[in-house]
């Protein structure tokens, strides 16, 4: 299981990215909102373009926009491994997936908590990744919607039944407890504020990986 770290809820994004770079996190998750698909926190493209100054890690780009085509090229120029956009845009999904693939990157579709999962079936063979949203898109630091746990299991089953190679990722509201519950079903966990609000990023990432127990236990001295 891989961890992708989001910095959306941070005020000083450069500092946060630098700190994440010092950990063994697998990807930097770049959330991009332009307020066409959802309202949310906007990080200007001029800032994101300079991300290479702060990290050499591969980027996992999450576009929360209605027209991905407008932005794909700019992210291709960065150290991007995959680009994901929302299945809910409906229009030009195939064209956008093909554009991402043309640049040699992995492509993914995200799916909001209220969207029918059956919409995914038709795309399973055409995408590298499904990003299941644990919250409604737009902001970091939201609480995980508990019903999504069930959705993760359903999508895992769908992938297995179709014998597809699609990776499964979950994004939004993930802390150690939720990570533990979804780990058997997902390939990638995206986590933001749980990591960036902590004092020790690496320790928190270890917790997400299940390498160490919950905070209270770990902090209890041995008597
Ligand atoms: C939500 C974003 C998420 C979010 C993750 O719109 O797509 O990537 O920033 O951050 P946390 O873990 O704080 O929910
Ligand atoms: Zn995201």
Image (cartoon, helix red, strand yellow):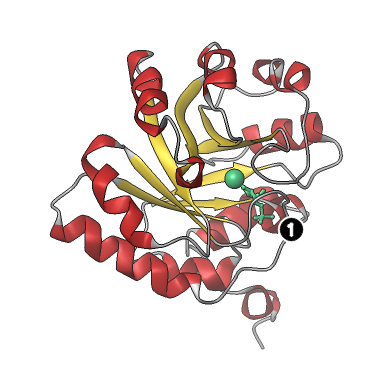
- Give how far across and how far down residue 88 sits, in percent: 49, 47
Number of residue marks:
1
Residue shown at the point (72%, 30%) measured from the top left: 18
Residue neighbourhood size for the residue with mark 1, other residues' Cα within 10 Å, grouped as few (<14), some (14–19), many (≥20)? some
Q: Is residue 10 left or right of residue 170?
A: right
Residue that appears at 39% across and 18% down: 99
Q: Which residue is mark 1?
A: 141
| Depth order, front residue of 91/25 | 91
Asked which quadrant contains residue 154, the reply is bottom left
Q: Is residue 102 left or right of residue 223?
A: left
- For ligand 2, give the image quadrant: top right
Q: Is mark 1 within 8 Å of ligand 1?
A: yes
Residue 140: x %, y % from top left: 72, 52
In this rendering, is residue 219 above or below 127? below
Q: Nearer the viewer, residue 71 or 11?
A: 71
Query: Callout 1: helix, strand or loop?
Result: loop
The residue most toward the bottom is 223
Residue 165, how many percent across, how many down? 21, 44
Which picture quadrant has residue 222? bottom right
What residue is rendered at 71% in x and 41% in y? 7
Which residue lies most toward the front here?
Answer: 91
Q: Which of the two residues, 58 or 67, is positioned nearer the viewer here?
A: 67
Q: Is residue 115 above or below residue 65?
A: below
Residue 120 versus residue 157 in the image, above or below: above
Coordinates of residue 173 in the picture (x, y in percent) = 63, 62
């Amino acid at each position: 299981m891989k961890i992708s770290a989001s910095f959306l809820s941070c005020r000083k994004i450069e500092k946060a990215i630098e700190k994440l770079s010092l950990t063994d996190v697998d990807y930097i998750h770049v959330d991009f909102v332009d307020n066409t698909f959802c309202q949310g926190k906007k990080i200007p493209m001029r800032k994101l373009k300079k991300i290479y100054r702060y990290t050499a890690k591969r980027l996992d780009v999450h576009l929360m926009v209605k027209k991905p085509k407008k932005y794909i090229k700019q992210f291709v120029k960065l150290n991007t491994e995959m680009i994901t956009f929302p299945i809910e845009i409906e229009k030009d999904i195939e064209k956008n997936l093909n554009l991402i693939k043309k640049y040699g990157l992995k492509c993914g579709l995200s799916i909001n908590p209220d969207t029918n999962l059956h919409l995914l079936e038709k795309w399973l063979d055409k995408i590298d990744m499904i990003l299941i949203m644990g919250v409604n898109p737009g902001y970091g630091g939201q609480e995980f919607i508990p019903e999504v746990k069930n959705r993760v299991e359903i999508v895992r089953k769908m992938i297995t039944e179709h014998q597809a190679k699609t990776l499964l990722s979950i994004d939004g509201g993930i802390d150690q407890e939720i990570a533990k519950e979804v780990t058997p079903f997902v390939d990638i966990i995206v986590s933001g504020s749980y990591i960036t609000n902590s004092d020790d990023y690496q320790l928190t990432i270890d917790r997400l990986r299940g390498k160490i127990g919950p905070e209270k236990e770990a902090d209890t001295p041995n008597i």
